[in-house]
Image (cartoon, grey):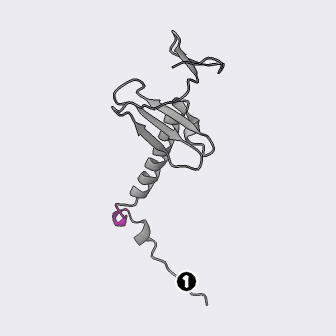
Amino acid sequence: MRQRRYRRTGLLHDEEERNPLEGVANLFDTAMVFAVALMLALVMSYQMPELLSPTEDITIVKNPGQEDMKIIIKEQGKPIEVMNLTDQIGGGTGDVLGTAYKLADGRVVYVPDDGNETTT
């Protein structure tokens, strides 16, 4: 004669006995996926995928010509360096390497000197 095993399946599937924090894990996972997608969308919208690449070198000038100007340098294998503008003026001796011109459309063009001229 066979013995029948009876299981009490009603305890696990009963709506009244359900854990109220059961759905929180799914909400956290959804929020993390949304945050990563938002960060990727922001990087792509600024057309700067170089920030995500570990092999690319990049230099960013933030607020150029302003009092709170910053230069952000990312080089391969080195930590990201942020340089702030200070009130100190650089000085010393050196050689003239060329001239930089700012065009009407905002671009800057560097023209190197021949090296034959001497200027002081």
Instruction: Please state the horizontal and vertical placement of residue 37, each as a whole percent of the image.
Output: 51, 41
In the drawing, does residue 63 fall left or right of residue 104? left
**Residue 23 appears in which quarter of the rendering?**
bottom left
> Residue 102: x, y in percent?
51, 14
Residue placed most toward the observer, 92 or 81: 92
Q: Nearer the viewer, residue 29 or 118?
A: 118
Kindly identify the residue that appears in the image at 40 percent across and 23 percent down.
65
* Residue 98 at least partly seen: yes
Q: Is residue 34 visible?
A: no
Residue 17 located within the stretch drawn in magenta: yes
Q: Which residue is rendered at x = 52% and y = 11% of the image?
A: 105
| Relative to 114, 41 lies left or right | left
Residue shown at 38%/30% (left/top)? Answer: 89
**How many tags in the picture?**
1
Can you give x and y, in whole percent of width and height, for residue 113 in the image?
Answer: 62, 19
Query: Does the magenta segment cover residue 19?
Result: yes
Residue ID for mark 1: 4
Of residues 7 and 21, the one nearer the viewer is 21
Q: Quadrant of residue 48?
A: top right
Q: Position of residue 43 (x, y in %)?
A: 52, 35
- Amino acid type at circle 1 is Arg
Residues in magenta, as a range = 15-20
